[in-house]
Image (cartoon, rainbow, N blue to C red):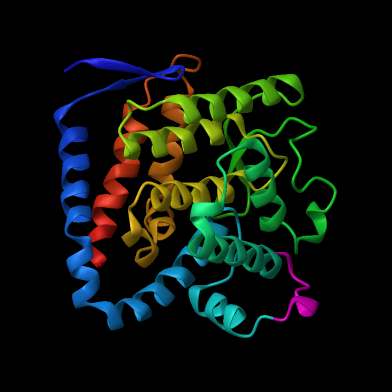
Amino acid sequence: MSKVTIHTTALELNWKLISLISDIDRFDASWAAIERREGQSLKELKSIATVRSVGASTRIEGSKLSDEEVDILIKNMDISKLEERDEQEVAGYFDVLDLIDESYEDIPVSENGLKNLHNQLLKYSEKDQWHKGNYKQHTNAVEASLPDGSTQIIFQTTSPGFPTEDAMRELIDWYSTDIETHVLVKAAFFCYEFVSIHPFQDGNGRLSRLLSTLLLRKYGYQWIRYVSFEHEIESQKTEYYRVLRSCQSQRPGEDVSEWVIFLCHALEIYKTHC
């Protein structure tokens, strides 16, 4: 099979990737009929998916709240009583996920658009008030939280200042002008590059997963609102970080095939829940 260039990376067009994309797109083509048939039950599915998404994505970053605790918090939201960091992060994630669900068509994929989402994501987090909505001022390597409470560096990120500003401008320019890349690959690569740059001081992992939902909704994959993409990533957290590290080790000019296949496979698994 052949390799193609996407922005600054390489992608191998192999049968596994082509099969995954075809399977997802066949399901997407049948979605309208499924939605008409299952309309009422989908409301309950969406509620479950929302709780799972919020819980999983914040736990990946170190939160200790279970899905049951997240559900109770969302149903009894009182922003004046969000004293714990985990609660603040859950509230922020829920707000942005809800915003995407209601207004995804109106959210621009631009630097200002991403900064506004970051500002919303961290608006309840007291420790993040000094940097929310602005690009990072300090180096921020990607770290994984281990079961024993310690952390492990996964990879280094783009340096703060001009390197980050230039990298984000180039990413947005690529996104705005690329009309050849399949939209599933385009969404997967955008989120990979966003995480690789790590443009904000904190919240990049959470925002990257929200961006995957935003881009997929914009590209017409409306069933994504009824499944928890984040839950699948949490269940494969070790593999998620391994794939990131594997691709990052080749940077710059890396081959991102393994990453794109990982995310497409996660989507392919979770579409079966609809």
Classify 38 as above or below 133: below
Q: Which residue corresponds to the image point at 57% horizontal and 63% vertical from the top-left? A: 99
Classify 141 as above or below 40: above
Nearer to us in this view, 134 or 234: 134
In the picture as drawn, the residue positioned furthest to the front comes out as: 106
Q: Which residue corresponds to the image point at 35% horizontal and 43% vertical from the top-left? A: 263
Classify 12 as above or below 61: above
The quadrant holding residue 74 is bottom right
Nearer to us in this view, 274 or 103: 103
- Residue 38 in magenta stretch: no
Does residue 145 appear in the picture of this structure? no
- Whole-percent x, y for residue 168 in the image: 62, 28
Q: Which residue corresponds to the image point at 39% horizontal and 49% vertical from the top-left? A: 216
- Whole-percent x, y for residue 16 in the image: 17, 34
Q: Is residue 235 left or right of residue 134?
A: left
Which residues lie in the magenta part? 78-85
Classify 22 as above or below 214: above
- Whole-percent x, y for residue 269 in the image: 25, 55
Q: Quadrant of the N terminus?
A: top left
Does residue 88 appear in the picture of this structure? yes
- Whole-percent x, y for residue 218 in the image: 42, 49
Q: Is residue 77 left or right of residue 3?
A: right
The quadrant holding residue 224 is bottom left
Q: Which residue corresponds to the image point at 60% horizontal and 29% vertical from the top-left? A: 197
Nearer to us in this view, 193 or 176: 176
Q: Is residue 135 left or right of residue 96?
A: right
